[in-house]
Image (spheres, coloured by chain):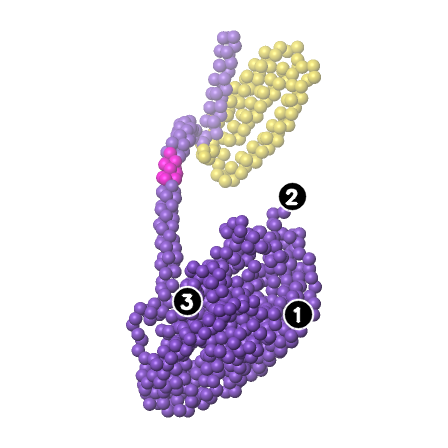
Amino acid sequence: MTPVLPHIVIQTISPDGISRLALTIFFMPIITFFVLFFAGKHIPAFIRSWLATIVMGVMFVLSLCMHIVSEGDHLSVWNWFHIGSIQFTTSMLITSYSTTMMIIATFVSFMVHLYSIQYMKERRNHSKYFPYLALFVSSMLGIVLSDNLLITFIFWELVGLSSFLLIGFWYEKDAAAEAAKKAFMFNKFADLAFVIAIMMLYAIYGTTELSVIKSQTNISGILHTSIFALPVFAGFAIWFATVGKSAQFPLYVWLPDAMAGPTPVSALLHAATMVAAGVYLLLKTSFLLGGWVSNCIVIVGCLTALLAALQAIRTFDSKKVLAFSTVSQLGFMMMAVGVGAYDAAFFHLATHAFFKACLFLSVGAVIHSMHHIQQHSFSHGHYKPFDTLDMRLMGGFRKKMPLTFAAYVVSYAALIGLPLFSGFLSKDAILISLYNQASMDGSWRWLVVIASLTTVFISAFYMSRQLFLIFFGEFRLGKTGEIYNKLFSEIRESDWLINIPLILLGVMSFWIFFSINPLHAQTGWWMKESFILTHIHNTEWFIPLTAFFCTTIAFLLARSIYFNQPNILERRNDLLTVLSEHNYYIEKGIDKIFIQPTMKLSAGIHTMDTCIDKLIHLKVYFFIALAQTANVLDIYIVDGSVHIVARVSRFIGSYFRSYLKGEVQSYFYFTLFAFILILVWLLWYQTAA
Amino acid sequence: MIPVSYYITVSILLFGIGSAIVLTRRNILYVLMGIELIFNAANINLVAFGQYDKYLNGQLFAMLIITVAAAESVVALSIIILLFKKLNSVNLTEIKNLKE
């Protein structure tokens, strides 16, 4: 009998020391999750939050040790489960990529945990917050470590689940519940592609082990024979899965809405766990990408970067600006993946994780004090709610919160890519790789380079705009009521638990942690062989200079418009505002293209169904009529004939009975009469014979 | 040897007398006696024709009938007693309960 499944047997490899360490790190947040989730209510909030934070700190230290000690690749394979005689395996692969990613994830989560201790203090549902964070981190580590697509998929879904739980953490707010649902639905839609990819790869290779698939795939060879081969489509499907998780056009619309969650969660989501998962998965499965799929990634990444950056210009919500900027930066990473500059993509992922987390946390600190102002104004009898996230109402926070301002400025500089900061290194690495690709292939790739330079320009513009609106000028909310000015003057720098993460993350924005040479990533040391960029081109100074030029112009432009803006800005009514407020009508488009036709189709099917119902009813009525006729026939003809027979015999019987009056002697008389008749008949018969 | 026709004549006479009693008398006890006569007419016939049988089956059968008739007359008499107790009469003109 030939086997139905194309399954192949994988030899198990027992884990070595490094792998055991990685497993230990991986299981720590899972244990934290279970302990805090089930017993959290019985533990005091203080112990609860510090326990989760310390576990995360230990994880960070262990990851760091592991990164220093680990050399080369460590693959371990276990037997997982078996169906009948088919043995499924699971595996874990530790490379310098994954150890680096673990450091990023654990460090940022450690910082976010520290920050959350103060930020989430005495908030509702506090006992569920830290277990959710732990689940989030452990699922991310699962994606990073696993080398089996099935396991990766399980953790991929867990990341989706925990993001759902955390975005909708304040689910009594309608916006949060809606945003959580939206994030979940968009991600689920994209995850469908992941399932398809796994099925395709299993059908081709008979295993879901990435190491085996990698050794058997030669994507350029496959592309040479047929550009529509199955492995190419598997790569496409995996890319589509990351379009949802890493918020690419057109599925990025859930990310700005996800700002409804707590700010530390946004920081974690944007830096280390959620959106990084998509890019990381693409890096892991990069051997499947090539040809038209890569072009697709570049074009969509470019569109995402440009469109999201444009939206950020017109947004006044301080967190949404950062969300759009994340989307835009993810577009950059995807472009790098598309042109095959995986190191540059991962480098940008790493630097972006630190400065974006820092930006979120520092803006979160500002929002925290805005929140305080609102609460105090309520307690002073001022029941006029205002949007605590609105940048138009902020301003002048520079003098009130100098440390937050410093952290913000440092990570801001990293994001817009000023020299001496980490963003400069990674962004220029991506730009150079795009430029190199364009100069090799030409044609439309030049448009990509121009678009990404424009995005650099726009990014610098909207970030400077945010910087000026939040930290410079005067406190514009004070113009709406004198009480706010009084409350604003009482604002102080936040608690040290908030400041320490800001300082540590802000420091990580400097170049020195990534490369000794502040102007080139070639001398990367911190991440070992992950970032030894191979693209050395003689025009490599042209691109950084252009980018720096764009940034400066954008900065000056933003300064001229928004610096010391005294009045609360009006919402502009131009095309870009309308487009960005509606997310370029993506949701409406999805509604028009997919949902409405589906609704129409279902309505049509419903009508058809009612028609079928009517037909069935008609048939039923026909049979009822038939049965009624049969009933009538039965009563009057079949039963009737039987009754007639019965009636005739009853009539005859009653006729004869009428002669019998119940007298014994008359019976005897009749018997005798009959006897005589028989005798007569016998005599007659005898004589006749 | 007495010819069979004599027996038959006696038997016919007995049958006729029995029938006449059954049909004419109104007292139920007389009717019962008439029925006994009819029985005996039949027995005579059996015995008469039984003399031609080597194994005397007729005679044996007559014996059986006598036994059965004795038992039967006991039953009949007890029925009559019950009837009398219930209706307080032995007159057949008053006993018309057989119909239905």
Based on the displayed image, in which of its 4 quarters is residue B61 positioned? Answer: top right
Q: What is the drawing colour of chain A?
A: purple
Q: Nearer the viewer, mark 2 or mark 3?
A: 3
Front residue of A687 and A453: A453
* Mark 1 belongs to chain: A
Q: Is residue A603 above or below residue A188?
A: above
Q: Nearer the viewer, residue A368 or A662?
A: A368
Q: State the image coordinates of residue A684 (x, y, percent, origin top left).
A: 49, 11
**Callout 3 crowding tier (Cα within 10 Å): few <14, some 14–19, many ≥20:** some
Front residue (pair A341, B31): A341
Q: Chain of mark 3?
A: A
What percent of the width, then of the height, locates residue A681? 49, 14
Give the secondary structure at mark 2: loop
Instruction: Report whether residue A8 is seen.
Output: yes
The circle on residue A450 is 3
User: Dot 1 corresponds to which residue?
Assistant: A71
Q: Which residue corresponds to the image point at 51% horizontal and 31% vertical from the top-left?
A: B28
Q: Looking at the rendered structure, which numbered label has been put on residue A1?
A: 2
Q: Residue at x 62, y 18 (%)?
A: B46
Chain B rendered in what hue? yellow
